[in-house]
Amino acid sequence: MFFSLLKMKKRLNLILSLVIGIAIFAIFFYRTGIDAVWDIFSSIEPLYLGLFALFTTLTFVPAVLRWKIVLRAHGKDLPFLALLRYTIMGYAVSYVTPSARIGGEPLRAYMVHKEQGMDLKTATSSVIIEKFVELSGSIAFGIFGLVLIFLIPNLDWRIKLFFGAVVLFGFSILLIFYYRSLMGKGSFSSLFLLFRLNKIARWNDFVYVILSVEKKMQKFFVKNKKEFFQAFLTYLLYGVLVFFEFNFLFKGLGFNEPFTTVILAIVVSGFVGFIPIPGGLGFLEAGQSALLSVVKGQGSLGFAFSLFLRIRGLVFVAIGFVLISYFSGGQLMERVEKKNKKKSRSTKKY
């Protein structure tokens, strides 16, 4: 009964978030005007869009390198291409679920466990640490972007205050999580016990699994500070690649935007990624349109810009789900083969 209600709640949340996202998308599309957007699309520069496609693909590389560094600290050295495949699969799941950039992480841990033979606790620990480093980099980048936001003279002070509060809140959560991990006071197990989830019969022993994962995380944060720093540097590489990605997209749409505008566009996209709406639907378009309306007086550019980001996201979602379906098909064939072997053995007995 509990799990059926939980599944129903998840479905309702997904439907509600999609309705909200579609409504916001429609409102901004109507307000921007199809003619204005079409004018921008008609002046596309194919060469720059090709460079945009190249750099948007390369942005997956730092994430894989970061995960690879964390896994090495756990004593595991896995193939780059395999980790790239799992990363794209996780991205696809995160994109279509209202989970604020973390929906695909359980899948990544499971894939490493299933295909690479790693124990699930180590795999889970590596994924959580990699995500923590990524979020730390996002906050650092957000602080830099926040400084630029406060320098915009005609931006409402309430918007500046809102962005400041969000960055401060995120920084505080990460700091608390890091401190508790260092001290051996797991945040996940504490929340698990706080909400008395261990009282649910099917989850009774799960707290011991969480505690084991948290011990591996504590060991990494205490004994692998060098690897932590190396992993953090990969996010700086990611920031450089994303800057070129966004810069070439602006050029591809026929606009040569200054450094500050590109950085602000990145910050807005990063902020949208934390909103629990699948793919930030509606909010990405609204955020970029509002930004370009303020700094350039051309909201249609922001809308066209966000549509290309949307297309980019959907392309990798499609690739990710093709990989997932291939894995699922392989799993199904494996089960069929096992059943056939069992049948043949039982037939031989008789």
Image (cartoon, rainbow, N blue to C red):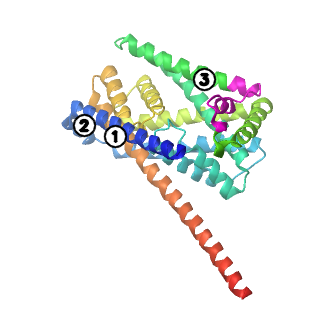
Residue at the limit of the structure toward the right, as seen here: 223
Indicate the amino acid at tag 1.
Answer: Leu
Assign a secondary structure to mark 1: helix
Q: Residue at x 48, y 55 (%)?
A: 321
| Residue bounds of the magenta highlight | 178-199
Residue 230 higher or lower than 117, as above or below: above
Q: Which residue is mark 3?
A: 173
Inspect the magenta stretch and tell me whether residue 185 lies in it: yes
Q: Nearer the viewer, mark 3 or mark 1?
A: 3
Q: CA distance from mark 2 to mark 3?
A: 39 Å
| Amino acid type assigned to the residue bearing label 2 in the image | Val
Q: Are marks 2 and 3 in contact (CB under 8 Å)?
A: no
**Mark 1 lies on residue:** 307
Q: CA distance from mark 3 to mark 1?
A: 32 Å
Element assignment for label 2: helix
Label 2 CA crowd tier, 10 Å (few <14, some 14–19, many 20+): some
Depth check: give the residue in front, 183 or 78.
183
Q: Earlier in the sequence, mark 1 or mark 2?
A: 2
